[in-house]
Image (cartoon, rainbow, N blue to C red):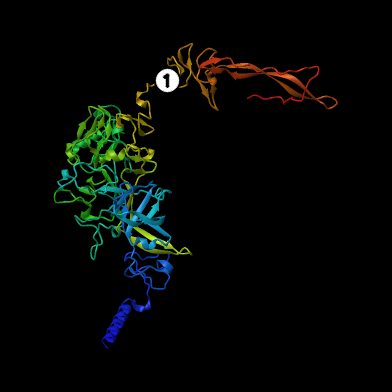
Amino acid sequence: MAETKRLLTLITLSALLFTSCVGEGGSGRKTRFSNNSTTDLNGGTGGDTGGNSGATPGSGDTIGEDGGVSIGSQVELMHLVDPFDGTYKKKLTLPKNFTGLLYLSGLNISSLSDRLVYARFVFGKEYEPVTVAATIGRAPGITPQTDVEVVILDMANHPFENMRLSYNLFDYNEYADEGRANGLADVVSDPRDPGLYCRGLHAKDDKTFESGVGNSSCDTAGEVCKYTYARVEDIGLYYDTDTASLPFAPTEPHVALASNDYEAEPFSNSIKRCLPDTIDKAINEKVLGVTFTGGFGYGVKVDTNGGVCGDDPGEDCYTYYGPYRDIDRSSWQISGAAIYSDTSAATAPTGIYKKSFGVNGYESFLFPRAGKMELQSGVEYIGSATPFVGTSFDTTFLTASGESDYLFGCSMRATNYDSNTQEGIGSCNVTARVELFTKDATGQETIITQSNNIVLQLIRPSLTDYRGQEVLYTSMKSCSSSQTCGGSECCFNNRCWSKELVSQCLEDVPVVGNKGVGESCQTDYECSSICCNQTTGSCAVHLNTEDEQVFCSKSPGQSCVAKEWCRQENVPNCFIVKTGANNVGQPTCALRCYNVPTFGDCTNGTCTPPEIPPVPAFDPSNPDCSEAINPPTFN
């Protein structure tokens, strides 16, 4: 009897265990996506996002074997793997020409191994999509002893190459010189630094912005929204016309260009410079080489001779509106007091500017906030060892070629900008979200997961050599003079090149040529016409156009650069030509010779008489007309 009771007890327990394993609704297979990962862009349904229709058992909109995923297989993207150092990051910055493998890690990635998966990066406030085919594989985990399943993206086809970099990088690193505890000592110059944020998103897509009920806008002092859209650009003085003021787009740094003496620079160079990121009158006068006689402030006017605008008829006048111009201000997603954050021990860097000025501001957080340049010895520039003290900037120079003190950040942006692509060192784009999705046989998309918890920032293309130096032409340091290049560099084709590649700088080549007609000369290359008359010792005329033909006509024995500069000689050219037919219809011919004006030959830089062509054999008593030609014409 006791054995029978024990048997009944075991049967009862087994039944209870069995029934506890059966899910409600009679289905043993369920689909669950992450809570923020359920939108089907083509009209299908995915998981539930608190309002969207969720995938139900048997609906077909499920992920996994036979149209479903096992219970609990919630897919969620957690990290991007930095291809340069192998670390796992929530935010990753890459040049847009990156061609390696990009890994995405997350939860339950292995559940996708039997599916064709795609990754879609949705960029900026315009939501520009870039789709990349993905595979599922294994990679080292956060600890070296573990492997994890990851989404692998092959970037060999440059999927981001055509992405527009329409936004600005802002530097929100904390610096000791601004009073921040444990702040950085050196100003960041690497565009991949984790403290840089690309402002290109709507506030609702900014994961650093703490929105909520009654707080949909980033508009309060100290409010953090580091990805929220705002755009500014460096600006120079405004040129006043009768109808408007036109801003100058700066192209030159605060470095002496025409000579080593900064204060001796002509105003034609100064007007091309960016304005210093300070409203200190003395520094602005030093940078521009002008005097603000009527005081200094927003909207102050200045002329080029230090006088009062308009006191001399016809003189040029300019207006100062600060160092920056706001772009598309009406579309900014940050407003009010949030725009300004005057960094101190108690105030963190969060805004666009530190301080307000007119309708804009100054001391911006644009990257780079300051920077150092490689300059030649003796070249004067405006710099400082303490860049966050605006009044500390002054004219200085290097006693030996090398790295300068800090220059204002606009000098770095001016010399690291490509006017063709309109991209510079601070240009960027940023993802609003990253999606994983799959397609069925009909092309219908089903979103697996989407997240703004991981962020990919794109910066301008880059290609570095084994020393870490930039070798991609469009991203190399721009220049208009070797003065702004390093001691071992030359300015060639508007870029600073190593002297290992450019053997002689343009400035080191003696100026030869461009002498006008009648000026004294010794060689052809001294003359703009490349024709030096050795008889008179002066530059002579040489023109060869459709409208005018006046030749140098050098005699045999004189120097030349090409045969066109040698005198034309009448050279006999003889041919057997057709003359008609005789009375029985047979063709007739005759030997004819023509005097043809022909340039002499330029042999080893010396004019020589032209060669005389041989006379063809011809017997008048028994002419051979088989190779006769029509009478030639000569131009």
Nearest the eye: 83 or 447 = 83
Residue 349 locus on image (x, y percent)? 20, 50
Q: Quadrant of the N terminus?
A: bottom left
Query: Horizontal and vertical percent for residue 22?
Result: 34, 77
Q: Is residue 327 above or below residue 587?
A: below
Residue 126: tell me if it is visible: no
Along the viewing direction, whichever of 134 and 215 lies nearer the viewer? 134
**Label 1: how many Cα within 10 Å (few below 14, some 14–19, many 20+):** some
Position of 298 compared to 480: left or right?
Answer: left
Location of residue 56 by image quarter: bottom left
Depicted 358 relative to depicted 254: above or below: below
- Total number of numbered discs in the rendering: 1
Q: Nearer the viewer, residue 19 or 548?
A: 19
Q: Position of residue 414 (x, y in %)?
A: 31, 39
Picture residue at 38% right of the left edge, 30% below the top? 501
- Identify the element where label 1 is drawn: loop
The percent position of residue 58, horizontal first and vertical second, equals 41, 73
Quarter of the rendering occupied by the C terminus: top right
Tell me: 111 left or right of 529. Answer: left
Which residue is pictured at 37% across the width and 47% down the height?
96
Q: Callout 1, which amino acid?
A: Lys
Up-down relation of residue 258 to residue 392 (above or below): above
Of all residues, the one furthest to the right in this rendering is 584
Q: Which residue is most to the top?
A: 535
Q: Which residue is mark 1?
A: 515
Q: Which one is nearer the viewer's eye here, 289 or 404?
A: 404
- Residue 152 visible at all: yes
